Amino acid sequence: MNVTLYGASGMIGSRILDELVLRQHKVTAVVRHPSKITRTDVKVCAGDVLDPHSVAETASGADVVISAYAPPEDATNLLTNATHSLLSALERTGVRRFLMVGGAGNLEVAPGVPIVDTPHFPPQWISHGLAHKEALSVLKHSDLDWTSFSPAALIQPGERTGRFRLSGNAFIPAPDGQSSISAEDFSVALVDELENPRHLRQVLGVVY
């Protein structure tokens, strides 16, 4: 597929990029600073996910668009702006399939109760959690064929094992009480869904 990937140089985005290339998809990696991506087997473009005109230009001709955009620590509200920008641009360009990296806080501990709205959510991550909640609210009003991927509570670089669980929109820790996933296996799950869509207009949790 022709895939346009935003946030391709980040911790999660770079692993998604690796997985896409491994499976021989044709990738346009869009970043603010192209020098951060040195590989030569993808097309690298400078672009601004916050600018709908830039998104429309870089997403033109794509079969699927993926956003792994992560806002700055001190400006998490930009995630909502980026979501508005992406959706408005994709609606204009005619790209129907949109995959978005969301947050663990959107996973529910009870029907209609995301974990970000509970006392159990770590206070140091509350601004990120609320930003992802707002971005998901924007996404749910779109008529695109979207899927929002929520990682486990802890996502970090690790191994690509290909073994993980899909939890739907529920927060389901492992039997030992931990909630974790490697960025590599998270990317496997995301590209699996890209290739075989089974969760359209849904939140999809990925956890060990």
Image: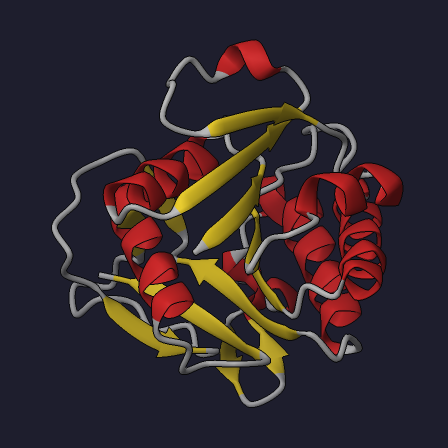
Quadrant of the rendered image containing residue 205: bottom left
Q: Is residue 94 above or below residue 180?
A: below
Residue lying at the far bottom of the rendered structure: 111
In the rendering, at what x and y percent does residue 153 appear? 41, 53
User: Which residue occupies the foreground of this view, 128 or 54?
Assistant: 54
Q: Is residue 202 above or below residue 41?
A: below
The mark tally for this picture is 0
The reply, left or right, for residue 83 in relation to residue 66 is: right
User: Which residue occupies the foreground of this view, 131 or 85?
Assistant: 85
Quadrant of the rendered image containing residue 144: bottom right
Residue lying at the far top of the rendered structure: 35
In the rendering, at what x and y percent does residue 167 appear? 35, 76
Please give the name of the residue rendered at 42% of the width and 72% of the height, measured from the top-left corner: 171
Please give the name of the residue rendered at 16% of the width and 70% of the height, measured from the top-left corner: 175
Tell me the colour scheme of the image. Answer: secondary structure
Q: Is residue 199 above or below residue 176?
A: below
Residue lying at the far front of the rendered structure: 61
Please give the name of the residue rendered at 74% of the width and 46% of the height, measured from the top-left corner: 79
In the rendering, at what x and y percent does residue 12 appear? 43, 39
The reply, left or right, for residue 3 in relation to residue 198 is: right
In the rendering, at what x and y percent does residue 68 appear? 55, 44
The reply, left or right, for residue 203 in relation to residue 188 is: right
Image quarter hosting the C terminus = bottom left
Please give the name of the residue rendered at 79% of the width and 67% of the height, measured from the top-left corner: 138
Image quarter hosting the N terminus = bottom left
- The answer to whether any part of residue 15 appears in the image is yes
- The answer to whether any part of residue 119 appears in the image is no
